[in-house]
């Protein structure tokens, strides 16, 4: 009866993939304090990262316009 629109908002055309690791530079801070990186212009929120950090991240989930990731190194 009710759809879980949050999970249905995933997009396989995103330039990054869930579970993959990427080297990024944190460019900005989100309103909740997460670091923001961009991969091919695609916004990635990185938990625990600060502006200027150069880190390796693992993508936890991908949505239509953004993704969530965590620092692995």
Image: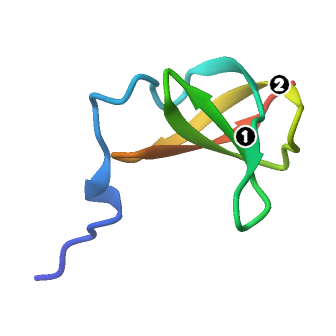
Q: Nearer the viewer, residue 18 or 37?
A: 37
Measured as percent of width and height from the top left, residue 37 is found at 67, 35
Marker count (numbered) = 2
Measured as percent of width and height from the top left, residue 23 is found at 72, 17
Q: How is the image coloured?
A: rainbow
Q: CA distance from mark 1 to mark 2?
A: 10 Å
Residue farthest along the left direction in this orientation: 1
Question: Few, some or many C-alpha atoms within 10 Å of disc 2 (few <14, some 14-19, many ≥20)?
Answer: some
Measured as percent of width and height from the top left, residue 65 is found at 39, 46
- Quarter placement of the N terminus: bottom left
Measured as percent of width and height from the top left, residue 66 is found at 47, 45
- Label 1's element? strand
Q: Looking at the picture, does residue 49 appear above or below residue 7?
A: above
Q: Is residue 46 left or right of residue 53?
A: left
- Label 2's element? strand
Q: Residue at x 80, y 29 (%)?
A: 72
Q: Nearer the viewer, residue 44 or 52?
A: 52
- Quarter placement of the C terminus: top right
Q: Looking at the picture, does residue 6 appear above or below residue 18?
A: below
Question: Few, some or many C-alpha atoms within 10 Å of disc 1 (few <14, some 14-19, many ≥20)?
Answer: many
> Counting residues from the N terminus, which is met first, the one under dot 1 or under dot 2?
2
Residue 54: which disc? Answer: none
Q: Is residue 28 left or right of residue 19?
A: right
Q: Is residue 30 left or right of residue 65?
A: right
Q: Nearer the viewer, residue 25 or 21?
A: 25
What residue sits right under mark 2 in the picture?
A: 55
Q: Looking at the picture, does residue 53 appear above or below residue 48?
A: above
Q: Residue at x 17, y 81 (%)?
A: 2
Q: Residue at x 59, y 40 (%)?
A: 44
What residue sits right under mark 1 in the picture?
A: 70
């Amino acid at each position: 009866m009710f759809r879980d629109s949050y999970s249905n908002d995933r997009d396989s055309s995103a330039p990054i993939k869930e579970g993959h690791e990427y080297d990024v530079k944190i460019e900005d801070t989100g309103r909740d304090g997460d670091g923001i990186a961009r991969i091919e212009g695609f916004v990635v929120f990185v938990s625990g990262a600060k502006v200027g950090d150069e880190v390796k991240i693992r993508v936890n989930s991908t949505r239509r316009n953004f993704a969530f990731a965590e620092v692995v190194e």
